[in-house]
Amino acid sequence: MKKRLALLALVAGLGAPIQVASQTAPRQVDRAQLMRDVTILASPGFEGRLAGRPGGVKARQWLVGQFAQIGLTPLGTNGFVQIFTFADEGVQYLGGNVVGRIAGTSPRARLIVVTAHYDHLGVRDGRIYRGADDNASGVAAVLAAARHFRDNPPRHPMVFAALDGEEGGGSRENGAKTLVETLSPATMALNVNLDMVSRSDANEIYAAGLYHTPSLKPILEDVRARAAVKLLFGHDRPESPGGGQDDWTLQSDHGEFHKAGVPFVYFGVEDHADYHKPTDTPDKINPRFFGDAVDMIMDAILALDSRLE
């Protein structure tokens, strides 16, 4: 995610106790599994998961194993893997999305596409940028959603994608662009994108995209009312001349869906002190916030699946 660091929000949140809403959504996910998945993806052995490099390829192979174990149907050009090429400083590399599908119970329903990028910044000056929150957390949430819908078939057919190439290095959002072109915008009802969902001292997470698709707001207002985290709406409109919130509309993989005319909901937290630093490690994650946030995201996907045309 390429948001500017929200210093005022960060300073205000430091040291503040997490406030838990009195009315909470039911728990949908295995919270211990969430942390196991993040810890594996953010482990030093994956070398920061830089797109097209050995650590990124190793992470991709691990994700293929997870998709197969869950029981998804492959949707890539080579099994679960969807290869694309990109150039970085004149060198050609191969990126690779990991993509699977679950059939829906409604034959006429369009796709809901749940995405999160698994690549990160690799190794710089001898230090591994492990990317626990950015974005092993989002990928772990995608895996949790896939496990749920494997056992509880959705109304809409769903595509689950761990995308490569979001962080740059010559490959900025090529993974998302490749997926959008493969699926065709006309087949998609919605993209739900997850990028940084495990850390907030203020117990807050944003849902962006409602400015562009206001019809989604009543659905997510109901989700917000029962969430154990504070679900905020915003970060999805042009900045006013005097300042205000950063516009995240094009700041992660959902931007490629938006440019193709596909509605999106993007869930993500504000930047924190470890954003794009080697210190973004699993031990910095608050498991309670992470679990509550992913439970809320699951509740949102269930509500969207139920209420969207």
Image (spheres, rainbow, N blue to C red):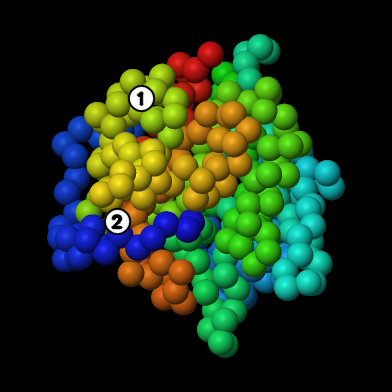
Amino acid on which disc 2 is placed: Ser
Residue drawn at x 51%, y 46% as measured from the top left: 250
Res 35 label? none
Left or right: 245 as drawn, with respect to 301? left
Left or right: 29 as drawn, with respect to 77? left
Looking at the image, which is closer to me, 248 or 293?
Answer: 248
* Residue that sits furthest to the right in the current view: 78
Res. 110 image quadrant: top right
Task: Work out whether residue 72 can be spotted.
Answer: no
Where is residue 229 shown, x and y percent of the image? 27, 43
Crowdedness near tag 1: few (<14), some (14–19) or many (≥20) residues, C-alpha within 10 Å: some
Left or right: 18 as drawn, with respect to 89? left
Amino acid on which disc 1 is placed: Lys
Residue drawn at x 54%, y 79% as measured from the top left: 128
Res. 184 image quadrant: top right
- Relative to 155, does residue 44 appear above or below in the rendering? below
Element assignment for label 2: loop
- Relative to 306, does residue 137 appear above or below in the rendering? below
Crowdedness near tag 2: few (<14), some (14–19) or many (≥20) residues, C-alpha within 10 Å: many
Q: Which residue is mark 1?
A: 217
Looking at the image, which is closer to me, 36 or 176?
Answer: 176
Where is residue 130 shown, x and y percent of the image? 52, 71
Considering only order in the chain, which callout, 2 or 1, is on the residue closer to the N terminus?
Answer: 2
Contact, mark 1 vs mark 2 (Cβ under 8 Å):
no
Element assignment for label 1: helix
In this view, the mark in front (1 or 2): 1
Where is residue 212 shown, x and y percent of the image? 44, 29
- Relative to 123, does residue 258 appear above or below in the rendering? above
Q: Which residue is mark 2?
A: 200
